[in-house]
Amino acid sequence: MRDMRSKCVVGWRRVPLGIFLAVWMFAGAGFESGLYAQPSAPVDLAKSGGDATPEARLAALSLEMTNAYQGVLRIVNQPVKAYVRSGNIDVSVFSPGWFHPGATKPDFNTVDIRQSQEFPYAKNKFAASDVTPGLVFLGEDLEFNSMTKYFYTNRALPKHKLSEAQMIEVNRLYRIIGRCEDEINRLQAPPATATQTTTEAVETETVVPGQSFESIRAIPKQTRILYGSGAIGVLVVVVIALRLLRKNSG
């Protein structure tokens, strides 16, 4: 019995490589598509913050971001003490208005507003503008910051110079806004699982012009698997039978 198994193995090794490859390609063509068309399990981003539903998670993020916005508005737009203009005092007049139109939206995830704080109003003791000709402000009380201008509300008035602690707090609130924006965008993005699966299936089944086995790939996958498995089984039986016949004739 041991010799018979050994000879069968030897006979199997002598099967023409071309026949084996043809049968293997016939059957394997169906397995290949099934192998590469399986998408990985999608991650439920809506539950990244717990077991809340996507709607509840979006509502919580929106509320958190709104609260952070309100905190920035309160700090950036705090009132500045004004004085009635009288006499021939030396005043720096800014025109047209206190600020140019427009504002740059900060990168809430990375910006440090301490690096963009400016003091253009401190050249003289008093500063004024053509939009408020009857009022003057102490130049040392004022600032301009391109990274908080996005939150300027009443542009008819200058903005109070922020302290170090206030700027650190604004930076903290900016990080909250940036994180909430990113999570909301991820939760609202359309799911890519269906598109990914369709694309992978198309790419797997694409027939390259001039490629061999075009007719094989046109056969349904289930049929290919069935026929391929049967062909391999028949081939094994034929090889064993040939080895037995050779042994008996010898």
Image (spheres, rainbow, N blue to C red):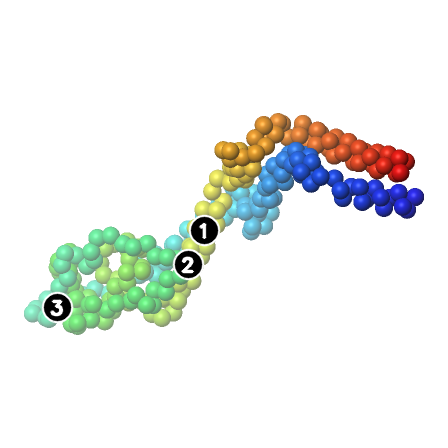
Name of the residue lying farthest toward the left: 88
Q: CA distance from mark 2 to mark 1?
A: 10 Å
Q: In the image shown, does 140 or 9 lie closer to the viewer?
A: 9
Of callouts 1 and 3, the N-terminal one:
3
Image x and y of residue 226, in percent:
71, 29
Of callouts 2 and 1, the N-terminal one:
2
Q: Amino acid at mark 3?
A: Val
Image x and y of residue 222, in percent:
67, 29
Secondary structure of the residue carrying tag 2 is: loop
Q: Amino acid at mark 1?
A: Asp
Residue at label 3? Answer: 91
Image x and y of residue 83, in percent:
18, 65
Name of the residue lying farthest toward the right: 1
Q: Amino acid at mark 2?
A: Asn
Residue 35 seen in the current view: yes
Labels 2 & 1 near each other (Cβ < 8 A): yes
Residue 182 is tagged as 1
Q: Residue at x 41, y 58 (%)?
A: 109
Residue at label 2? Answer: 109
Q: In the image shown, does 143 or 230 lie closer to the viewer?
A: 230
How many C-alpha atoms fall within 10 Å of the one at disc 2: few (<14), some, or many (≥20)? some
Q: Is residue 50 above or below residue 98?
A: above
Q: Residue at x 32, y 68 (%)?
A: 115
- Report the quarter where the C terminus lies: top right
Q: Residue at x 60, y 41 (%)?
A: 36
